[in-house]
């Protein structure tokens, strides 16, 4: 599995996942994943875009101090859809949040 860490231009510190968080991502048995993540003092935010073949899934990494960004990863419960459908069905706000992931996936997977 290939995992890509991307940095957004934002006021928060872009932070790669810790080793145990990377392990959680690898457990999802995807072919590839792109993510951005920003940690603050007590919380964090970000998204992971997963690819299995030509289907995609999006996971929100937002959390408070009680949980980490990957603690609730359970993609087997979610529907895997085309990259275009995922992006086109997103709200305008979500599109802005995941645009960097979508563009990276467009370059890496043809």
Image: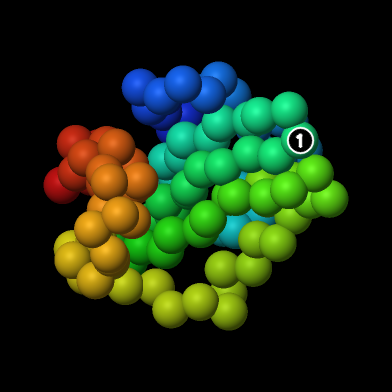
**Which x, y percent locates residue 2?**
47, 38
Outermost residue to the right: 66
Residue occupying image coordinates x 63% and y 39%: 44
Q: Is residue 68 left or right of residue 16?
A: right
Q: Is residue 11 left or right of residue 82?
A: right
Q: Which residue is mark 1?
A: 42
**Which x, y percent locates residue 96?**
27, 46
Asked whether 67 or 53 is in front, the reply is 67
Q: Which class describes the residues within 10 Å of circle 1: few (<14), some (14-19), or many (20+)?
A: few
Asked whether 98 or 12 is in front, the reply is 12
Q: How many marks?
A: 1
Residue occupying image coordinates x 66% and y 29%: 40
**Residue 75 quadrant:** bottom right
* Vertical relation: 65 (above or below) 81: above
Asked whether 107 or 95 is in front, the reply is 95
**Which x, y percent locates residue 31?**
44, 51
Q: Does the rendering let one see residue 24? A: no
Residue occupying image coordinates x 39% and y 73%: 80
* Vertical relation: 42 (above or below) 26: above
Q: Is residue 100 left or right of residue 64?
A: left
Residue occupying image coordinates x 41% and y 51%: 49
Q: How is the image coloured?
A: rainbow
Asked whether 106 or 95 is in front, the reply is 95
Secondary structure state at the residue bearing disc 1: loop
Q: Is residue 47 left or right of residue 73?
A: left
* Vertical relation: 107 (above or below) 58: above
């Amino acid at each position: 599995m290939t995992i890509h860490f991307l940095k957004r231009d934002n006021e928060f510190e872009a932070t790669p996942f810790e080793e145990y968080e990377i392990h959680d991502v690898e457990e999802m048995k995807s072919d590839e994943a792109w993510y951005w993540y920003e940690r603050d003092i007590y919380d964090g935010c970000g998204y992971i875009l997963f690819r299995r073949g030509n289907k995609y899934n999006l996971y929100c990494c937002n959390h408070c101090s009680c949980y980490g960004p990957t603690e609730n990863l359970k993609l087997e419960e979610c529907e895997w859809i085309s990259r275009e459908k995922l992006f086109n069905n997103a709200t305008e706000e979500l599109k802005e949040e995941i645009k960097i992931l979508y563009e990276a996936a467009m370059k890496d997977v043809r």
